[in-house]
Structures are given as structure tokens and as C-alpha cells.
Image (cartoon, rainbow, N blue to C red):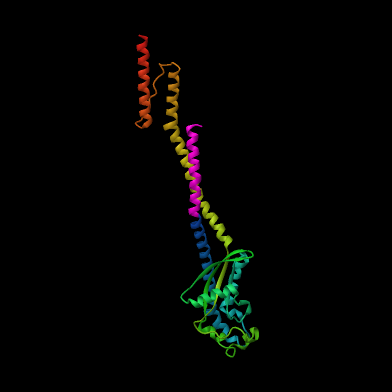
């Protein structure tokens, strides 16, 4: 096996080890970056829902409220507006969802599931906490859940304080058993945005490729550079010296000296070899005389 092959095998082994260590060190960082990007997208969707809620409570509800006595209009409810607004996103991305889960809602479709209730109770136990994100296993795959607390405001109590105070049209639609007893400032539920972790995995793979391509380019550049350096600085001078030594060993003592221009180890080796060559030529001359 030649010197170049040995060097290349060594560099290949180092490159494989380096790639493994790089992957080991980069994977947690890449996954964290990808998850944070997905969380950021979830936060944007959450803010979109919050914007729909704010617009409805400030612009729509005051107009519709006088008519609620005769007929209940869910369009005046900020939660309804937020969910209908999210339907646009859900139509394009069916795996994405938005819920406003409550422990005691008027509409039983909004009743919190067990895991949503755990999140709501976590908010109730820690009122200073403004956001919770968890990864949950589902039959369709892992889901990233982003939740924010829903706090009962004074305007909410017009419909949710007691059944007697609630609009008759609302009682007719939802009944008088659920959605009452709320208190101002109480955390009664949570906004929950669900995003499939597959989105995070796809993003992580993309980021990994962005890391890997420059790294592979660096390895390729290193291979080419080392091989060029090895060829011109080590292999070719040694091959010239080897050919010269072989010729002399076969009796061709008048073979021209090989001149290596350099002050490194190969330069000193070449100078020593040429001195030996000259000494050998002088010895043959003296024997001839």
C-alpha cells in the first residue's frame, strides 16, 4: 500500500469519526432549533386567534349584544370567532388544530379532555405561568401542544355568572346546566394550538442538511488539499529519490543528483542522499585509479 493510500485511509477514518461526533453534537441543537421554529409558528397562530377574539369582543359584540335577548348569535362570542378564523388554516393544514378548552363550558364540545384539563389545572395552580408546551402521543403521531390560559373577564360574566343572569336565548340553545359559576379573574380554560411533530422533524432534517453540506464540502476540500500537498511536497520528492537510489544501486553512478529546494526534513534527507552519492562516486573513482 502506497504512502498516499495510507494517508487517505487515515483521513477517511478521521472524517468518519468527525462526522459521527458532529452528528452526535449537532442533533440535539438541530432538534431544539426545529422545535423552537415550530413553536414560533404555533405562537403566530395563537396570536392570530387572539386578534380575532379581540376584534370580536371590541367591535362585534357591542353591536350584536342588544339582539341576544331574542336570538343568541354565537358570532358575538370571541371564542367562536377565533375558531372560525382558524378554520381557514385547518382547511389547508388538516393536522393543525385550535381549541378553546374549558373545565365548565356552555357548549359541551368545548369541554376539556383529560390532558387539556391537566394543562388548565397547571395554569390555575401557577397563575404567573403564561404558556405551556408539551409533546403528546396520538394515534396519528406525536403532536406539539402550545397552550395559553383563558381568564374570565367582566364581560364574560354577563353570560356565565349564573343561569338566571344569562340571556334566555343562550339558555334555550345550551341549557342551564353548564357554563355558569365563573368568577372574574378566574382561569376557566386554555387556548390550545396543536401542530404535528412531523413538521418539526421535516424542519430538523432541512436544518441538518444545511449543517451537513458545508461540513461535507470542508471534508472534500481537506481531502483535495492534503492530497495535493502530499503529492507535491512528499510523494514526488520521495519517488525521485527512490528512482535515483535505484539507478545508483544498479551501477549507474553517473545518475544526476536530485535537487530538492527546501529546508524541511525532505530537504535535509535529499542533501544527505546527494552527499552519499558524491561519496560513492568518489570511492569508485579512487578504486578506478
Residue 65 seen in the current view: yes
Whether residue 89 is situated above or below residue 55 in the rendered picture:
above
Which residue in the rendered view is the most extreme toward the top?
289
> Magenta residues: mostly which secondary structure?
helix
Q: Position of residue 247 (x, y in %)?
A: 45, 19
Which of the two residues, 250 or 215, is positioned nearer the viewer here? 250
Q: Which residues are magenta?
A: 1-26
* The quadrant where residue 242 appears: top left
Q: Is residue 176 left or right of residue 212?
A: right
Q: Is 224 a magenta residue?
A: no
Q: Position of residue 187 (x, y in %)?
A: 52, 79
How many marks the image carries: the answer is 0
* The quadrant where residue 49 appears: bottom right
The residue depicted at 51 percent of the width and 45 percent of the height is 16
Q: Position of residue 15 (x, y in %)?
A: 49, 44
Which of the two residues, 98 or 267, is positioned nearer the viewer here? 267
Residue 82 seen in the current view: no
The residue depicted at 52 percent of the width and 65 percent of the height is 39
Q: Is 5 a magenta residue?
A: yes
Whether residue 202 is situated above or below residue 111 in the rendered picture:
above
Which of the two residues, 114 or 229, is positioned nearer the viewer here? 114
Q: Position of residue 34 (x, y in %)?
A: 52, 59
Amino acid at each position: 500500500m502506497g504512502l498516499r493510500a495510507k494517508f487517505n485511509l487515515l483521513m477517511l477514518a478521521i472524517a468518519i469519526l468527525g462526522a459521527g461526533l458532529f452528528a452526535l453534537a449537532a442533533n440535539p441543537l438541530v432538534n431544539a432549533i426545529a422545535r423552537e421554529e415550530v413553536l414560533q409558528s404555533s405562537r403566530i397562530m395563537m396570536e392570530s386567534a387572539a386578534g380575532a377574539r379581540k376584534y370580536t369582543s371590541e367591535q362585534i359584540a357591542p353591536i350584536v349584544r342588544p339582539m341576544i335577548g331574542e336570538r343568541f348569535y354565537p358570532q358575538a362570542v370571541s371564542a367562536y370567532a377565533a375558531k372560525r378564523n382558524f378554520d381557514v388554516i385547518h382547511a389547508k393544514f388538516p393536522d393543525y388544530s385550535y381549541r378553546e378548552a374549558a373545565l365548565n363550558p356552555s357548549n359541551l364540545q368545548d369541554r376539556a379532555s383529560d390532558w387539556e384539563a391537566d394543562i388548565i389545572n397547571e395554569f390555575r395552580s401557577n397563575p404567573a405561568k403564561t404558556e405551556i408546551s408539551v409533546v403528546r402521543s396520538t394515534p396519528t403521531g406525536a403532536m406539539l401542544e402550545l397552550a395559553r390560559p383563558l381568564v374570565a373577564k367582566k364581560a364574560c360574566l354577563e353570560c356565565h355568572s349564573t343561569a338566571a343572569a344569562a340571556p334566555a336565548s343562550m339558555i334555550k340553545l345550551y341549557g342551564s346546566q353548564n357554563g355558569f359559576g365563573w368568577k372574574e379573574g378566574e382561569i376557566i380554560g386554555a387556548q390550545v394550538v396543536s401542530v404535528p411533530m412531523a413538521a418539526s422533524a421535516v424542519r430538523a432534517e432541512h436544518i441538518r442538511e444545511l449543517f451537513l453540506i458545508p461540513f461535507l464540502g470542508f471534508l472534500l476540500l481537506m481531502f483535495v488539499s492534503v492530497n495535493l500537498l502530499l503529492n507535491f511536497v512528499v510523494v514526488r520528492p520521495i519517488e525521485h529519490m527512490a528512482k535515483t537510489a535505484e539507478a545508483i544501486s544498479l551501477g549507474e553512478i553517473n545518475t544526476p543528483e536530485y535537487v530538492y529546494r527546501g529546508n524541511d526534513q525532505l530537504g535535509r534527507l535529499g542533501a544527505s542522499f546527494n552527499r552519499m552519492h558524491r561519496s560513492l562516486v568518489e570511492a569508485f573513482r579512487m578504486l578506478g585509479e
